[in-house]
Image: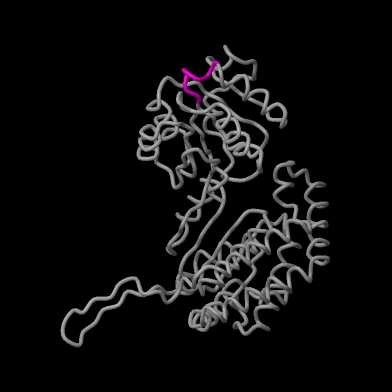
Amino acid sequence: MREGSSRMTCEETAVRARRAAAVLGSLSGDKKNEALEAVRRALLGSAETIVGANLRDLARAENDGLPAPLLKRLKFDEAKLRETCAGIESLMKLPDPAGRVLSARELDAGLELYQVTCPLGVVGIIFESRPDALVQISSLCLKSGNAVLLKGGREAAETNRALHAVIEDASVRAGLPRGWIGLLETREDVADMLALDGLIDLIVPRGSNEFVRHIMKNTTIPVMGHADGVCHIYVDDEADPEMAERVAVDAKTQYVAVCNAVETLLVHRGLAGVFLPRLKAAMEAKGVELRGCVETRKIISCAPADDADWKTEYLDYILSVKVVDSLDEAVEHINTYGSRHTDGIVTGNPGNALKFMDMVDSADVFWNASTRFSD
């Protein structure tokens, strides 16, 4: 225990998680689904407590001057709770990812080799101030049979405590081992976690590039980084302008404060004169500020964009726009300034679409679809 506190240390929490992981990893898919259902019901039944905790977090964060887009991320009302619980219900319908036979070979008479999926063990996840992320992460870990240590943003401290308590209590009553889910709260906990290479099997940091690099440099535990979302959509000269408008508006405005919202729109010169005026009207109707290159501002009036804009994840109602001469120029721009998260092309030309998807270096590359689908 920490001096003067009854709260467990990070190492004590990790030890409990390691013990629980051995049991959790052996549970059947049906048993894990029963626990997920118990968690879903408990969360919905605890809505008043959870929303109350979130309102206190919101009031404190607003008083501390947290920017509006981040306040939107922090908000966790009853509608958001129901949406998150619907995600648990969808997760339950998926096949059990553990125990699947991927391959089987007979090496010799009586000598057989099987490749079978199994849980990692204990996963440490550091995430931003989005309470729904805590539910999503813990549910995915439960489904896959992994114990989890959660370190959320301090802005969501009360909401995270309420969610953790409900999830742990409901899952333990459903037969899961106590300690499979642990909540960490301080910066010191993060530093302690990075040293626990004998107890933690994987760390997943969600945050800026600088933060992810800091984690990688300060631990010997394997790290799977999740960093910036500087996402792009390229509107080809063979795009349907109406479709391009719908895709761009959804990608920018459906939820601005997330890593898969589009930040830069690239428009082929051959379509720019037709498309940019309708884009301006549609984006202004949604309250989006456009920042354009010199060629863009020859067609529509907007604020100027500079080199810094091409590198910026706004997480706000701001969209940078650049006119390009070719698909190759669009690809070069994305591979230079993008964060390799999610990028898309709008075009009616299958050859252009396939070339774009082959050449863009991103985790998700879409054709005629919003970047928000990567969520």
Residue located at (57% from left, 77% from top): 32
User: Where does the image place residue 241, in percent across and percent down from the top left?
Assistant: 55, 26
Q: Quadrant of residue 142?
A: bottom right
Left or right placement of residue 116 versus residue 204 in this view? left
In this picture, residue 105 sits left or right of residue 69: left
| Camera-side residue of 65 and 271 | 271
Q: Quadrant of residue 183?
A: bottom right
Q: Which range is magenta?
A: 267-273
Q: Camera-side residue: 129 or 97?
A: 97
Q: Is residue 149 magenta?
A: no
> From the viewer's perspective, is residue 229 above or below residue 240?
below
303 and 266: which is toward the camera: 266
- Helix, strand or loop: magenta stretch: helix
Q: Residue at the location (52% across, 25% down)?
A: 307
Query: Farthest residue in the top direction?
Result: 298
Q: Residue at x 72, y 73 (%)?
A: 41
Residue at the limit of the structure toward the bottom, as seen here: 110
Q: Position of residue 315 (x, y in %)?
A: 64, 40
As displayed, is residue 111 above or below residue 327?
below
Q: Is residue 177 above or below residue 278?
A: below
Residue 35 place in picture, x, y as percent: 63, 78
